[in-house]
């Protein structure tokens, strides 16, 4: 199917097989949904393989992707060769009726480029239907979020099998927020998280019983940018964090975290911090946390500067080293003082 436009009425691509084991592959080129409901497969007879090769634009309405055949056989959705844009409305990728309680496997989803830009309308993406009806695995290669009305409304996936390779929170023109709702105590894995602009936020859903741990391998905060991560009583595991300090305000935290009864946890022995474009001999507020931080959990190359904590251990500071000329002046002053001291003793 090269092009599908759904603007008002409901539409279903019926993929029920006459034989339970028949593999059905539906390949879509470009999809545009601005109203109504599009069902790729029926709940009783979903797709074995659904492939998006072009661009899908969802500005309103609902796109249901039903995976699995005849209540029994697992299915897969793949858009790694395509692009999905959600500015409003929702995409729901789920198992067909009865799949979760059946004797065989459940569905999987592999998403390529995904852009979410909900503003006045909520942009929503759903995987699975509830904690008893989960997908086996879900991956997103590149997720870019702009504006504040964006939610992964359900990340109901087997624990350890939900991964975002690259998450871009782009707040250069407006605040950028992504909320994620999943199974309680589930871990959401993010390989690289890039923050551009001020007031970018990654939030676990505030709904009771749906709070997630975030495991972020690499966090990159661009010049003039700030980030907020809120897990509401769950942990943030962090590997490395890089901060471009060009133009940074020294009294504004570059990263604010709210973890409640959780904490910031090092992925390895410690969280490695890297700083660029720092003003010399200047102290910056790097992290503000709702929970106490431990200095030993963080590392920075001494050639860049030093780290310290506030009195209540909720703020982490970075102080850049003086320039070589300043060091020379310092050592010169120390040498002169020592010479004067020795002369007086003699």
Image (spheres, rainbow, N blue to C red):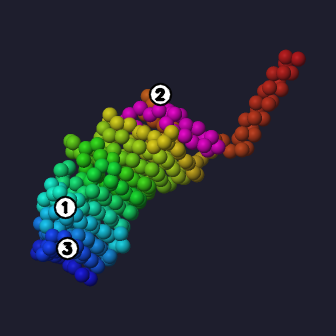
Q: Which residue is painted at 44% across and 34% down in the image?
A: 293
Q: Which residue is painted at 19% across and 64% down in the image?
A: 73
- Mark 3 vs mark 1, foreground winner is 3
| Residue 300 sits inside the magenta stretch | yes
The relative height of residue 301 versus residue 1 in the rendered view (above or below) is above
| Residue 267 sits inside the magenta stretch | no
Q: Position of residue 272 (x, y in %)?
A: 52, 44
Q: Position of residue 158 (x, y in %)?
A: 28, 52
Where, by quadrant of the figure, is residue 255 drawn? top left
Where, by quadrant of the figure, is residue 235 drawn? top left
Q: Which residue is painted at 46% across and 40% down in the image?
A: 266
Give the residue pinned by disc 3: 22
Which residues make up the magenta segment?
Answer: 289-309
Q: Which mark is residue 311?
A: 2
How many angstroms separate mark 1 from mark 2 (CA)?
51 Å
Q: Which mark is residue 95?
A: 1
The 10 Å Cα crowd at callout 3, few under 14, some 14 to 19, many 20 or more, is: few
The relative height of residue 177 versus residue 17 in the rendered view (above or below) is above
The C terminus lies in quadrant? top right
The 10 Å Cα crowd at callout 2, few under 14, some 14 to 19, many 20 or more, is: few
Q: Secondary structure at mark 2?
A: loop
The N terminus lies in quadrant? bottom left
In the rendered image, the residue lying farthest to the right is 346
Whichever of callouts 3 and 1 sits on the residue coming sooner in the sequence is 3
């Amino acid at each position: 199917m090269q092009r599908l436009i759904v603007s008002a009425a409901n539409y279903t691509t019926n993929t029920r097989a006459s034989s339970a084991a028949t593999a059905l592959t539906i390949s879509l080129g470009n999809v545009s949904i601005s109203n109504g409901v599009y069902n790729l497969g029926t709940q009783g007879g979903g797709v074995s393989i659904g492939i998006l090769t072009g661009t899908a634009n969802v500005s309103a309405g609902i796109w249901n992707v039903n995976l699995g055949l005849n209540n029994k056989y697992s299915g897969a959705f793949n858009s790694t060769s395509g692009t999905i844009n959600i500015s409003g409305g929702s995409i729901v990728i789920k198992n067909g009726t009865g799949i979760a309680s059946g004797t065989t496997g459940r569905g999987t989803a592999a998403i390529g480029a995904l852009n979410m830009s909900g503003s006045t309308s909520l942009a929503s993406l759903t995987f699975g239907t509830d904690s008893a009806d989960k997908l086996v695995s879900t991956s997103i290669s590149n997720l870019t979020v702009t504006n504040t009305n964006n939610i992964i409304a359900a990340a109901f996936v087997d624990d350890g099998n939900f991964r975002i390779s690259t998450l871009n929170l782009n707040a250069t023109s407006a605040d950028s927020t992504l909320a994620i709702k999943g199974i309680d105590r589930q871990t959401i894995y993010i390989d690289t998280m890039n923050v551009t602009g001020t007031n970018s936020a990654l939030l676990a859903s505030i709904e009771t019983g749906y709070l997630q741990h975030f495991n972020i391998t690499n966090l990159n905060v661009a010049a003039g940018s700030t980030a907020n991560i809120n897990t509401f009583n769950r942990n943030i595991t962090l590997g490395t964090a890089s901060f471009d300090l060009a133009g940074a305000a020294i009294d504004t935290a570059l990263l604010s975290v709210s973890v409640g009864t959780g904490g910031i946890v090092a992925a390895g022995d410690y969280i490695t911090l890297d700083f660029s474009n720092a003003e010399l001999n200047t102290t910056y507020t790097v992290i503000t946390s709702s929970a106490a931080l431990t200095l030993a959990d963080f590392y920075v190359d001494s050639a860049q500067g030093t780290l310290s904590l506030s009195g209540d251990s909720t703020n982490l500071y970075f102080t850049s080293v003086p320039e070589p000329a300043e060091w020379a002046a310092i050592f010169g002053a120390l040498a002169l003082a020592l010479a004067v001291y020795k002369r007086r003793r003699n």
